[in-house]
């Protein structure tokens, strides 16, 4: 992940948001021609990572609960394309440049970066994305989403 992060950081295309207090519910940023609104808290959590063996299961079960504060690292990887890494948030988008006034989520994919390679995960369907209106990583597990937006009237 570090090569991706350093490449886009050098281009000024990396921003982070974080829920700094339990009372904070939203944070909005401008990036890549969109206003991105992050809502923190609530929602169902993702499926936990696969656990192998009884020892691994016991270790996972004995970990202390994670704080409920959400965060996201946002990387603008191309026109209308974003990579989100974090937990405990939901994101919506609205165009900030001339053209069609509504932003939709064309695709949302759960990915991971492992040993210098992108490993594709599952494609998020409409039931999990509010009919293509938001991307979310809920619960105590850090996740990664690759999002492609589109605009329409």
Image (spheres, grey):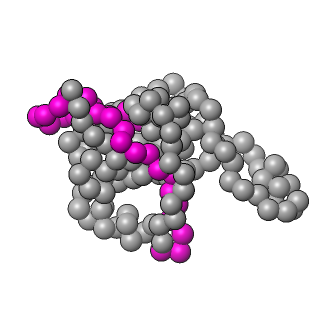
Q: Position of residue 28 (x, y in %)?
A: 33, 33
Q: Position of residue 130 (x, y in %)?
A: 47, 29
Residue pictured at 23% horizontal, 51% vertical = 79
Residue pictured at 53% horizontal, 74% vertical = 115
Q: In the rendered image, is residue 39 in sight?
A: no
Q: Position of residue 47 (x, y in %)?
A: 67, 45
Residue pictured at 54% horizontal, 51% vertical = 122
Q: Main secondary structure of the magenta part?
A: strand
Quarter location, residue 27:
top left
Looking at the picture, tell me which residue is in the foreground, 30 or 66.
Answer: 30
As drawn, is 6 to the left or to the right of 116?
A: left
**Residue sitting farthest toward the right:** 54
Looking at the picture, tell me which residue is in the foreground, 11 or 46.
Answer: 46
As drawn, is 108 to the left or to the right of 36?
A: right
Q: In the rendered image, is residue 107 in sight?
A: yes
User: Is 3 situated above or below 15?
Assistant: below
Range of residues picked out in magenta? 90-116
Is 126 a magenta residue? Answer: no
The quarter of the image holding the N terminus is bottom left
User: Is 10 situated above or below 19?
Assistant: below
The quarter of the image holding the C terminus is top left
Residue pictured at 54% horizontal, 69% vertical = 114
User: Is 26 situated above or below 1?
Assistant: above
Quarter location, residue 149:
top left
Looking at the picture, tell me which residue is in the foreground, 128 or 32.
Answer: 128
Looking at the picture, tell me which residue is in the foreground, 22 or 86.
Answer: 86
User: Is 87 situated above or below 4?
Assistant: above
User: How many labels sit on residues?
Assistant: 0
**Residue sitting farthest toward the left:** 98
């Amino acid at each position: 992940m570090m090569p991706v992060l350093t490449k886009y950081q050098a281009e000024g295309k990396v921003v982070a948001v974080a829920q700094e207090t339990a009372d904070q519910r939203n944070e909005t940023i401008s990036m890549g021609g969109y206003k991105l609104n992050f809502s923190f808290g609530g929602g169902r959590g993702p499926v936990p990572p696969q656990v192998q063996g009884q020892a691994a299961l016991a270790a996972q079960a004995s970990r202390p609960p994670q704080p409920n504060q959400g965060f996201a690292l946002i990387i603008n990887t191309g026109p209308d394309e974003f990579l989100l890494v974090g937990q405990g948030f939901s994101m919506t988008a609205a165009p900030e440049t001339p053209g069609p006034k509504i932003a939709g989520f064309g695709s949302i994919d759960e990915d991971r970066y492992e040993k210098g390679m992108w490993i594709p995960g599952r494609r998020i369907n409409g039931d999990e994305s509010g009919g293509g209106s938001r991307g979310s990583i809920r619960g105590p597990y850090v996740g990664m989403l690759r999002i492609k937006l589109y605009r329409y009237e």
